[in-house]
Image (cartoon, coloured by chain):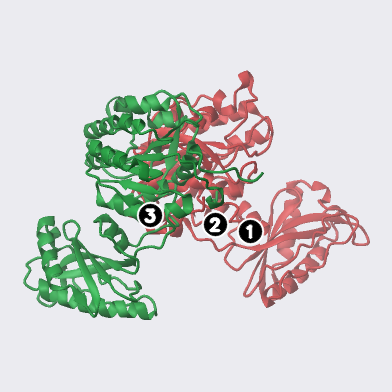
Chain colours: A green, B red
Amino acid sequence: MASMDLRPLLQASGAKIILYVWDGLGGIPAGPDGKTELEAARTPNADRLLAQATCGLLEPVYPGVTPGSGPGHLGLFGYDPIEFQIGRGALEAAGVGFDLQHGDVAARLNFCTLDSKGVISDRRAGRIPTDESKQVVAKLAAAVKKVDDVEVFWAPVKEHRALLVLRGEGLGDGLLDTDPQKEGVPPLEVRTSDESKESARAAKVVRKVLAQAMKVLAGEKKANGVLARGFAKRPHWPSVQERFGLRAAVVAGTPMYRGVARLVGMESLDATNEVAKDVASLAAAWDRYDFFFLHYKHTDKAGEDGDFKAKVHYIEEADSAIPALEKLGPSVLAVTADHSTPSAMKAHSWHPVPVMLWARTARGDGLATFSEKMCRQGGLGLRPSTHLMPLMLAHAGRLAKFGA
Amino acid sequence: MASMDLRPLLQASGAKIILYVWDGLGGIPAGPDGKTELEAARTPNADRLLAQATCGLLEPVYPGVTPGSGPGHLGLFGYDPIEFQIGRGALEAAGVGFDLQHGDVAARLNFCTLDSKGVISDRRAGRIPTDESKQVVAKLAAAVKKVDDVEVFWAPVKEHRALLVLRGEGLGDGLLDTDPQKEGVPPLEVRTSDESKESARAAKVVRKVLAQAMKVLAGEKKANGVLARGFAKRPHWPSVQERFGLRAAVVAGTPMYRGVARLVGMESLDATNEVAKDVASLAAAWDRYDFFFLHYKHTDKAGEDGDFKAKVHYIEEADSAIPALEKLGPSVLAVTADHSTPSAMKAHSWHPVPVMLWARTARGDGLATFSEKMCRQGGLGLRPSTHLMPLMLAHAGRLAKFGA
């Protein structure tokens, strides 16, 4: 089914929507008694809502396709993740919470080890610890701030990874990676992938930036070189305000999720990854927005660690925050996930995620407990994640009749 | 949902996939006690796998559309049957197992009866029996072997139908049918449907071939004329190796299914339509391929014959081969069908087909018996057949994460 332009149908209703994402919620039945984490967890609040809610399963990107966190969330926000793809540099900026402006060019950097002839001996600089990497980035940030009127920003990411951002007039992002993807050769020269003068200008600046960086790093034992990948600008996407008429806010303690939400125009509220505090932050902003995206991280982390018990525990913690959200009086409260992270797989997976949509206008399914199996029987059926946004809008009275 | 290019996500995993097709499996509840054939059959092996498998219903082409065998299988192979259409001549060649080369032009022939004035009195030559038709084709094959440096091949099909193939340099397939689709008129002249010199060259050859054929047939009582339809080359499709990274093999005792599988790049293994032998053939090639398409024919035949009991019997026979397949240690074993063939309808039908996907990474549905009704409750939901291939790849660990 092609996606539909909902703008002609949008109407104000004053109704507020909460999208509560339990990251990596979905599982496979690999726990005691053949249960999934969600089946093993006690979720009295979700279960209570479920009786009057409609539920189903969402497929985040495409059948069989395992989503990264970016695509997984974009689907929930109503943005087809295949159509709306983010360049790696821009995603990295979102990931560390760097406020990428329109026109900035971002790249992902990998520190590497070069031998005396300038040949790469280790593409990941021995995966130096994040603390070491931070010190190296601090040196670079102190030494290389401006080149040819272009501002240069550096930010640490994790281990041997870092972020480079250029800010100035007329910079293009048509630049090829300098990472040769193998060892035993020197880093590649900076080259352009298109003929624009903007990309040529950016290439000239990047050459100088990297040359200066190499000098700064010369004394390092491991991280004495740097490789750049995925040059990209912030994408120009229509915001949730433009597409869905929503003043939207994000409450997410992890920079990546805030970053993705901000790419679609959500405003960022204080967040800590402590759910009670995050709900309080949301409550404090209740009057200012129509739509709240509340992100709960720990479920995914436990899944990636392969810790079934911990994931059960965190699902229960996420559930415990529901009453405080109900008290705010939302018209729609949707609980779902960006993707599955079965602890048996220790990784994200393609399995459809459970979704529960509570609203006074919902066709209540009358089901008993919030689980993958129950959701399979729910009235929302199995559908792409991108369907959730129009359904939330409808249940909030925000979509007018189509045709007479 | 638009289809997604999976190539950037493909990764080797060493995991092997078996797609086991029970042709025409789906039914309607028209048997004793209102059961379908699958419900009436004892399928202990499929039932045992089902508990740890995920299941659902597949719609082969489009809602309400009854697939032929070609489209039905293409969907299962991940090729949208509406996008990937085969010209009739090429399909006929696949159907009789003729090894159509790139550049060959194939056409479907119908023997017809002409009166003394050359007017068609019977478009199907009294539907002469296949044995008679074979003799006529043998005469043609002996008499017309080469025209203008173009090799000419003839093959019998069924009753009044035959296959014509031209092999030579620079032949086009832009030729119109010579079958006027009615009686009381003579066959149409050979004409081109485009302006290319390749089609003009082919037209010249076909005129001579048909003229020579008419002379050979002059003495026949019934089949004294011939009508040509659906001139077509073998389609240039990307193979399953290119699209899905699979070294794939087909085990199918009936030429049509082998032919369709070979059009998408599968290699053909020995097959007999005796299931134990066919499984042994598959097992013997186990190390050489990543993907095996095993075809079980008798279920469809029984459905077309309107023989409920026989279809039940053959479903049970198909089921009995499962343990031998399990012993090979596949990572994914999918059991499904190319279309439904309800014995109550004595024909292919549009009804969605049951599918069961067993894998260690499957979200087991915990359902009891393999049937249309159970599959309706399964975690795969109701979806197009084309979704099966990405799902099989995912469950085999052959698709990398999309986005970060």
- Label 3: how many residues lie within 10 Å, few (<14), some (14-19) or many (20+)? many
**In front of the other: A175 or B44:** A175
Mark 1 and mark 2 lie on one chain; the one further toward the N terminus is: 1
Image quarter hosting the C terminus of chain A: top right
Labelled disc at residue B90: 1
**Residue B313 quadrant:** top right
Tag 3 residue: A265
SS under mark 3: loop
Residue drawn at 28 percent across, 60 percent down? A99
Kindly identify the amino acid type of the residue bearing the numbered disc 3.
Gly
Q: Is B39 drawn above or below residue B92 in the view shown?
A: above
Residue drawn at 46 percent across, 37 percent down? B380
Labelled disc at residue A362: none
Kindly identify the amino acid type of the residue bearing the numbered disc 1.
Ala
* Residue B49 visible (yes or no): no
Q: Position of residue B312 (x, y in %)?
A: 58, 27
Q: Give how far apart the Cα atoms at labels 3 and 2 are.
A: 47 Å
Q: Residue furthest top?
A: B33
Q: Position of residue B178 (x, y in %)?
A: 79, 62
Kindly identify the amino acid type of the residue bearing the numbered disc 2.
Leu
Front disc: 1 or 3? 3
Residue at mark 3 shares a chain with residue at mark 2: no
Tag 2 residue: B263
